[in-house]
Amino acid sequence: MFLTYSVFASLTVACLSFVASQDAIFYVSPDGNDLQTAVNEARKIGVSSPRRIVVKDGEYFLDKPVMLDNRDNGLVIEADSDAEPVFYGGREISGWEKDGDKFYSVELPGVKEGDWDFRALVVNGRFCPRSRLPEEGTFKHLSVFDVPWMSTTGGGWKRKPTDEELTTMKFHPKDMGEWFVPENAEVTVYHMWDESTVGVKEVDFENNIMTFATPTGHPAGAFDVKKYVVWNLRQGMTQPGQWYLDRAEGKLVYWPLPGEDMKEARAIAPVMESIIIVQGEKENPLKDIAIYGLSFEVTTTPLIAGGFGAGRFDGAVNITNSMDCFLQSIQVSNAAGQGIKVNNSKIHIQGCHIHHVGACGIRAAGCHVTDNRIHHVGLLYPSAIGLVGGGTDGIYNHNEIHDTPYSAITCGGPGHDISYNRIYRAMQMLHDGAGIYCFAGDNLRLSQNFIYDIEDTGGYGASAYYLDERSTGCVVENNVSVNVARPSHNHMAVDNTIRNNVFVYDGDAVLTFPKSSEYTVEKNVIYATGSITFTNIDGISKLKNNVIFSGKGKIVGKRMNNYSDAGESSINFAKKNVVSDPMLVEYKDGKILFDPDSPVKKLGINPLDVSNAGPRG
């Protein structure tokens, strides 16, 4: 038997249905119903009874984030059958007027006063690029910071940077002019594996010194990286589709694409950093919340340096102190910060689609993150990562990640399983990262992953599989790397195993082991049309039963003194390995096929098929 009631709230109607089992169902629709009100009404039922909020198809513009806490334990929020509800963390912008020959602008209340500031604009569903100088590439600044980096484990900088070094940069006089408006300008200072985007306090044109409004993460010039970009100035509007926020004049300025009519265009500017916030208590975690089938778009970020992996920014979906919660079939796009960010929680994230975001796709330490699609991340912060793991005993399997400016997956800590991921076109801007990068990994398992098409852009390099400082007891097994010059990079890592992988590269390949030791490298197929170099060959204690083939006939083992080349070793690779063509028949789709006469079989190298890496179904 069904009993139906109506519950009224101010400006909102939420329809509540009871079934015999005391299940409670609330319906939310764009016709006036409010998700937060439905949450509040569901709290009246109490956590001992099942409650469900069903969201109808349509668009929902929010004035503030939806908040869930321990009063919502057990709550399910889901899209209605065949519905695709979208929640926006921004406002629609109208009233555009011509601003010069090419641009359109609109005055926005609160911008000039500093009450409304944002770093993302969405026009007709497109995450629009900001005005930038230079038009392409980067400027080269003149700041010097020649203090040695002692590694993360070694404590970072040999000398702590001063406040002045973290807040000033010397620029070349040809790069800037009196047209520079400090209150509008934002500057990205590039480091090695991250960057800092900060505001400008003042500019001294006599001495060519720029002073930042907040500190950078590393000093300008650190790691001998001299690159920077200036954003959000009128002079940086060099092509259609760009925009800038004129804080000095209190207006938003946009250059329409060809054929884009600003009377009909739909522009949305963000007003919040998160759209839905799930917040438990540290000693009393929130439990058993499930969110299915919702989409979230348009958020902003504060004007501060984001740190490694842009980790200081919140997510459009932000979850803290929670356990046994589920996010499934969630879509996040056109967000300035993270897509989904999880802190101090053990939850499941499955079948989600995160794309075109300013920072990372998913940050979820110690969680089960499976079958997700993540791409075109780091649109504002190039140190952003597709998927950030960590904590303990996480599962990061069957994800597809591509088009990332830095690493596709990073993970550290004990007991993680990183398997069946499909990764390509990572490391497009920054250095010293990989398709899968692990720092301080303890007994990690990297298996059945398929990584391809990663170009080395210089600096400290780009790799397919990277075990960094303090990684120990890890197994990299049954993976494939295609078109990655450095398939395996290992740094200050001890007692790890690289086994039964297939590494294929059209050119000169290198496997690197600086300051590493006690490695086992066995039963791998390493194929390069050019040379093959093992750096710090002494870091490998067991190198056996591999098939190693160089199209140039050049296989070299190099010794190292710290990070310096100490000359070639006299190792005979053919003594315990097969130096011969593995006779690959097929490999590009991840299904590895060998000619029947290939030497792999007699070495006990197992058949390998990673063509099913990526989301299932």
Image (cartoon, grey):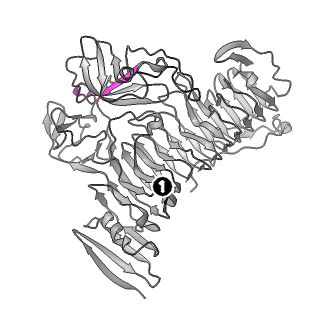
Q: Residue at x 53, y 35 (%)?
A: 407
Is residue 520 something that shows in the picture? yes
Q: Quadrant of residue 390?
A: top right
Identify the residue shown where x is 35% and y is 77%: 16
Location of mark 1 (residue): 282
| Residue under the image location 25 percent in, 67 percent down | 31
Task: Kindly state the secondary structure of the residue where label 1 is placed.
Answer: loop
Q: Position of residue 565 (x, y in %)?
A: 67, 14
Residue 598 drawn at (x, y percent): 81, 35
Closer-to-camera residue (368/165): 165
- In this view, 438 is above or below 529: below
Q: Is residue 504 left or right of residue 65?
A: right
Q: Please tell me which residue lies in front, 609 or 341.
A: 341
Q: Quadrant of the N terminus?
A: bottom left
Mark 1 is on which residue type?
Lys
The stretch of residues the image draws in magenta is 227-238
Image height of 317 relative to 219, above or below: below
Crowdedness near tag 1: few (<14), some (14–19) or many (≥20) residues, C-alpha within 10 Å:
few
Residue 435: quadrant of the picture: top right
* Residue 431, position as x, y percentages in the image: 52, 27
Image position of 117 (left or right of 520): left
The mark tally for this picture is 1
Q: In the displayed structure, does residue 388 sit left or right of residue 126?
A: right
- State the image coordinates of residue 217 (x, y, percent, origin top left): 42, 29
